[in-house]
Image (tube, coloured by chain):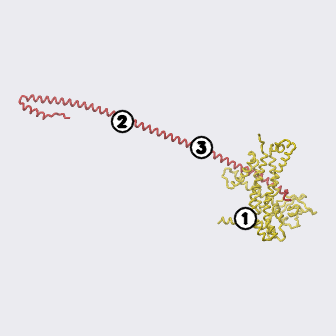
Amino acid sequence: MDLFLPESGLVIWMLIAFLVVFAILAKVAWPMIMGGVEKRNAHIAESLLAAEEANNALAGIEQKKQETLAATQAEQIRIMKESQDMKSQVIEEAKVQARQEAEKIVAEARLKIEKEQAEAMAQIKNEVIALSVDIAEKLLQRELSDKQAQNAYIEQLLKNNPPRIEA
Amino acid sequence: MKNVLKYLFLGLVLIWMAFAPAQSMAQEAEHPKEEKFDAKSFIFGHTGDAYCYHITEIKGKPVCVWLPVIVKCKGGSWHCFSSKHVCELKEGETFEHKGAQFYVSPISVDKYPGKLVELKADGSLSRPFDISITKNAFGIFLVCGFMLAFFLPAARKYKKDPLATPTKYQGLVEWLTYTVIDGIVRPNIPEKQVKKFAPYLLTVFFFILFSNLFGLIPIFPFSANVTGNLSITLVLALLTFFFVNAFGNKHYWKDIFWPDVPIFLKAFPLMPIIELISVFIKPFALMVRLFANILAGHIVILVLMGLIFIIGGLYGVGMAGVTSVISIFMTVFMFAMELMVAYIQAYVFTILSAVFIGLAQQEPEHS
């Protein structure tokens, strides 16, 4: 049967056409397509890797930031505590100092008062002595006249010269 | 609304496409000069090669696309003319070109059926050396042109900027290319050789796939039964044979002529003979498998269609009407199956080529 015999003309055309197409595609199509796809695959893989690296780096930075933040916070707390301590210490010291000062003042005042008291007593004594001497003088002057009158005169003297110290 | 119109149009085209062969056959069958429907010449006329693209017949006149006839007579003279001159000849007429008489012998004769022959002056027939652009040759060029037009723009895009976001068209090309590379080439050929053999396997795969698919489209410029023709599968098988044996390594040849079998099998060269035969059997099987599968599919479709006219001729128009409903249903089913076969046969041819090439590249196992 003719159907099962190859036809020389068709074989020739097929061989020429197929080889030409094969040559063209093998030269300029298939390597380009495969190369392009491979290049793109490689690029995507590289990009993914780079992205992961960047992500990791970012995570490192984040961690560092957290660490720094925590350290700063601790430092802050420490400083605050220190200042608190210092403050209370200062207050305490001031209190002590103030008390000492006050005590000193009080002691000084007391000394002064005692001194003045002594002085006043001395003055009173002197005055009492002077008055007594005065009265005694007057009495001695009037003794000669009347006893009654003497007493009245003392009374009067006392009334006129009341003791000057009351405070 | 636009979509509805679109689908309606598409549906009408599909219905027309399903009925068009039937219609043209009906015209052939109703033609007064043909008293009987000749199933054999109908089937082999449609599956075989032809000098012109017969589209249909209007009022007894064929509507054809004429193709060039290029022949070299035994005397050494070249003749080139349009196939219009020889295809429109009536029975017994010849066409004279530069002193030689030509005509196309009918399909029903035993000697050179359907071929252009030269009628010598002494009344003897001779078959000239024929490199006409026949229907199948035209089909080959169409597929080749389509492949170039389909793949070259994509290649240019990849060359220009491989890192650009691929377009939809590039995605399609990539998907098609990488189904073959990842599904057929890589599993069978050592990774180092993939770049060397992938171009051939890709070209073969797409040539067969597009030829098969174009062969299923029943209108001009498609419908040529390219892969269902032995000449074409012969060339493809020869190329695979070349790629297997021309690049076969030392281990491959050693396995053929001195395989690892007991010495008495080699000394009396039983195994080498078997192995050597298998070298030729493999491409032969490839050739016949592709050819037979595609041809059989076409024949089944044509038989189912021709059944309408055979039954019509036997039992009248009424029965033909009934048969046509069943036949067209079956034909649609066959077309769907042929779509599948179109892919499967391209796949089978390519994967077997890849396996044979891969076997010839295998390194011996060190154990």
Query: Quick check: marks 1 and 2 in contact, CB under 8 Å?
Result: no
Q: Is residue A92 left or right of residue B213?
A: left
Considering the numbered disc 1 on the image, is that residue within a helix, a strand or a loop? helix
Write down the chain letter for disc 3.
A
Three-letter amino acid code of the residue under disc 3:
Asn
State how far apart marks 1 and 2 are (Cα).
Answer: 110 Å
State how far apart marks 3 and 2 are (Cα).
Answer: 58 Å
- Residue nearest the observer in this picture, B265 or B346: B265
- Neighbourhood count class around disc 2 (C-alpha, 10 Å): few under 14, some 14–19, many 20 upward: few
Write down the chain letter for disc 1.
B
State how far apart marks 1 and 3 are (Cα).
Answer: 59 Å
Q: Which part of the image, by quadrant, shows the C terminus of chain A?
A: top left
**Residue under circle 1?**
B14
Q: Give the chain coloured yellow.
A: B
Instruction: Please identify, in this view, whether the residue under mark 1 or under mark 2 is nearer the observer.
Output: 1
Q: Give the chain coloured red.
A: A
- Residue nearest the observer in this picture, A52 or B164: A52
Three-letter amino acid code of the residue under disc 2:
Lys
Three-letter amino acid code of the residue under disc 1:
Leu
Tell me where residue B50 appears, x and y as whole percent.
Answer: 82, 62
Write down the chain letter for disc 2.
A
Q: Residue furthest left?
A: A145
**Residue under circle 3?**
A56
Tell me where residue B366 appears, x and y as whole percent.
Answer: 77, 40
Considering the numbered disc 3 on the image, is that residue within a helix, a strand or a loop? helix
Same subunit, tags 1 and 2: no
Q: Quadrant of residue B172?
A: bottom right
Query: Quick check: marks 3 and 2 in contact, CB under 8 Å?
Result: no
Q: Which mark is residue A95?
A: 2
Q: Is residue A160 left or right of residue B294?
A: left
- Residue nearest the observer in this picture, B318 or B53: B318
Query: Quick check: marks 1 and 3 in contact, CB under 8 Å?
Result: no
